[in-house]
Amino acid sequence: MRIFTFILCLFSFSAGAQCEPDCQKHGKRAVVEGRIVNKNGEPAAGIKLKINTEHGCPRTSVTTDAYGTYKIDLAEGRYEFVTTYKTGTEDSKKVIVYKGEKVRVDFDEKRIKRNEVLKVSDEDDEPLN
């Protein structure tokens, strides 16, 4: 079954599929956690953080707790994290996660950076293990 899934993943990437099948669930997981704060620096509780594939296909979501924090396990891959503050302001970050890693992705409404890419690697551009 794993060989079939692997071949299916390779086929969908080589075919340039916009929304690949859920191939990433078969790899090792990475922990992504962070905090979302509003423009006053206060925790943004109850904010939904949408997690899409790098092609914009919805993958999953997570909601912040009373402290504005969240934590989620994801398979290795490239994602776009998208959040909308209660003021209606939208923010997004592109994130690359590697298997077995712990990645921190914070959002601050007063410091919005468009198209920020976060990557966990060493100085030789090798994934950290």
Image: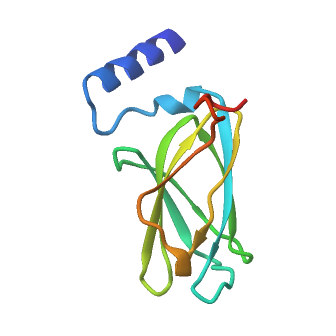
At 32% from the left and 25% from the top, the residue drawn is: 12
Residue 19: image location, x then y, percent = 32, 39
At 50% from the left and 84% from the top, the residue drawn is: 86
Using the rendered view, name the quadrant where residue 125 is placed. top right
Residue 96: image location, x then y, percent = 53, 42
At 61% from the left and 28% from the top, the residue drawn is: 126
Query: Can the viewer see residue 36 in this picture?
Result: yes
| In the depicted structure, whether residue 31 falls above or below residue 51 | above
Question: Is 42 left, or right, of 22 in this rendering?
Answer: right
Question: Is 46 left, or right, of 78 in this rendering?
Answer: right
Query: Can the viewer see residue 1 in this picture?
Result: no
Colour style of the rendered protein structure:
rainbow
At 45% from the left and 34% from the top, the residue drawn is: 22
Pick out the residue farthest to the front.
Answer: 123
**Pick the front one: 118 or 10:** 118
Total marks placed: 0
